[in-house]
Amino acid sequence: MASEVPTLFDWAGGRDALRRFLDCFYDRVEQDEELAGFFPGGVSEEHRDHVTTWWAEVLGGPDAYTRELGGYAAMLAHHRNLSITPEQRHRFATTMSLAADDAELPDDPEFRAALMGYVEWGTRLAMHNSQPDAEVVEQAPVPRWGWGVAPPYQP
Ligand code: HEM
């Protein structure tokens, strides 16, 4: 039954696992010649914490980004005018895949396909919205990502 399918948040291992993932990611970003320039002085504790809260909500956990951190509009505002290039977007996305390995997130094909589906979607939107002349959707709910076509196989 569909109601028995776990959320991606629970499958990942909850907030602690997502924080581990994002720490591995931003530790790589800080050393990356393509991406480090976005975060002068390094990626702050506050940034790591806020982005973890975002990811938790997207993957089906608590909706704290919406309730406490300004929701979609706040996230959007952080990306405006960053002028992300296709090369930077690609590096960002592939670095997330490496960070998922570093953090030892579940490596079943279904989970990783769903995770990287969101990364591909999110980075393309971030790149679009970051262009100085972008037409953007200012108000939208925080997305809720699911398993797509391949939930865990449960005989
Ligand atoms: C799946 C894709 C992405 C997600 C989920 C994401 C998530 C977020 C969130 C939630 C924030 C706001 C944090 C807060 O509330 O304090 C943020 C800020 C930021 N993001 Fe992203 N982001 C993505 C893609 C990108 C890309 C592709 C880049 C650049 C290559 C980028 C660069 C930044 C920067 C520089 C900030 C901080 C801006 C500031 O503090 O003014 N993001 N991101």
Image: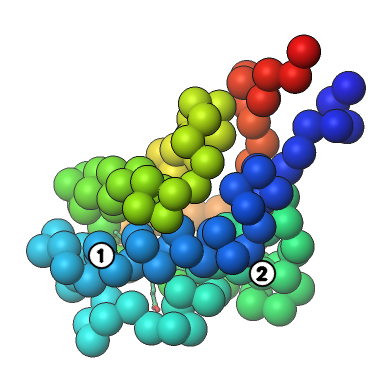
Residue 144 in the image, given as x and y percentages of width and height: 68, 46
**Residue at which label 2 appears:** 65
Q: Amino acid at mark 2?
A: Tyr
Distance of label 1 from label 2 (alpha carbons): 23 Å
State the SS at label 2.
helix
Q: Kindly tell me whether residue 33 is visible in this rendering.
A: yes
* Label 1 sits on residue: 29
Tell me where residue 138 appears, x and y as whole percent: 58, 61
Q: Is mark 2 within 8 Å of ligand 1?
A: yes
Q: Would you say 110 lies left or right of 70 here?
A: left
145 shown above or below 154: below
In percent of the image, x 25 and y 64: which residue is there?
A: 29
Q: Secondary structure at mark 1?
A: helix
Q: Which mark is residue 122?
A: none
User: How many discs appear?
Assistant: 2
Tag 1: Cα neighbours inside 10 Å, few (<14), some, or many (≥20)? many
Kind of residue sitting beneath label 1: Val
